[in-house]
Image: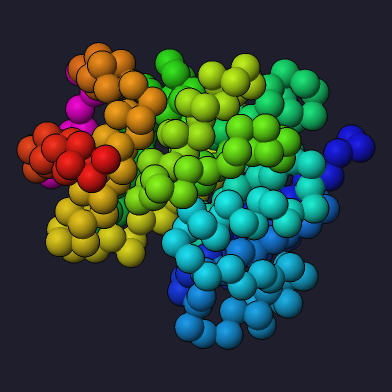
Amino acid sequence: MDKKVTVLITSFNDTRIRNTLESIRGQTMTPDEILVADGGTKWDISKVCSEFDARLEIIPGNVVETRSKAINIANGDIVAFIDTDEVAPAEWLQKLTEPVFSGVADFTGGPTRHKPPKSGPEDYMNKLEDMIYENLVPENIAYLPMGNSAWRKSIFQAIGGFDLNIYGGSEDYDINIRALKSGFRGKYVPEAYLYHDHSDISSYRALIKKRYSYLRATAKTYIKNRQLANRVTSSKGRRVDHPFYIIEALMKPVALIDAFLRN
């Protein structure tokens, strides 16, 4: 393995980063670099980064802007992404990057698992992610979320990186589509799972805000990449067994119109 690996964590005011960093330091495969790209945390994040020997870079901006700039300064040839609300089992990095090292794929991604939810909104987010990873991603790697993935750094350089006009949770779908259209190969790795904590989404007001922002950004991505018809087809029969799914279904056409008006 002559290629270097950077584990990139984008952070902002999330104390759960300690658990994330601890899990990365416990990997069977030691990364060459742990890079924390912080968007402007109000407390002293440098202490926890120093404790786990992580490189800290303060990069103000939204998550897409911060992550995009961080990729450019990462030292690794392969960049693995994990978020501050996620914790990695010991063999995660090895399993996630193996297809890239072996030449089978140019980017990979794995699913998420969850602890029992403490609220209705958390339960919905858990079930929604389960549906995405069990139904959508195995059929079409373009739906792979960025939060548990590994990429050749050269891909971002080749396709121009993230579209900074798309943010709110759908920037990963946009870059997946562009990478695939450019001939890069993606692979789903079910055994490279992370534990994802959604306990911060504890009220339905917060859930509505989060999901509407995502739906609008996703609609913008569909419009840009002319994927709307494909998305409608792929969504048929994909339901989440939760009462909130009805509200989300009602928000979708509103978010689509909103996205059209903002274009």
Q: Residue at x 21, y 57 (%)?
A: 209
- The secondary structure making up most of the magenta span is loop
Q: Is residue 70 above or below residue 215?
A: below
Res. 158 image quadrant: top right
User: Residue 153: x percent and y percent?
Assistant: 71, 40
Q: Relative to 159, is 74 on the left or the right?
A: right
Residue drawn at 64 percent across, 38 percent down: 156
Q: Is residue 150 visible?
A: no
How many numbered discs? Answer: 0
- Give coordinates of residue 198: x percent, y percent: 35, 56
| Rendered-image quadrant of the N terminus | top right
Residue 184 highlighted magenta (yes or no): no
Could you say which is closer to the camera, residue 165 or residue 39? Answer: 165
- Can you give x and y, in whole percent of width and height, for residue 135 in the image? 36, 22
Q: Is residue 219 left or right of residue 193?
A: left
Q: In percent of the image, x 68 and y 71: which residue is there?
A: 56
Q: Position of residue 187 (x, y in %)?
A: 59, 23
Instruction: Identify the image quadrant of residue 26.
Output: bottom right
Q: Is residue 129 left or right of residue 176?
A: left
Task: Identify the residue shown where x is 56% and y is 55%.
Answer: 67
Q: Which residues are magenta?
A: 237-245
Q: In the picture, which quadrant includes the C terminus?
A: top left
Q: Nearer the viewer, residue 60 or 23?
A: 60
Q: Is residue 79 visible?
A: yes
Please determine whether, in this image, residue 116 is positioned above or below residue 21.
Answer: above
**Residue lying farthest right?**
2
Protein image colouring: rainbow
Q: From what the image shows, is residue 100 above or below residue 123?
A: above
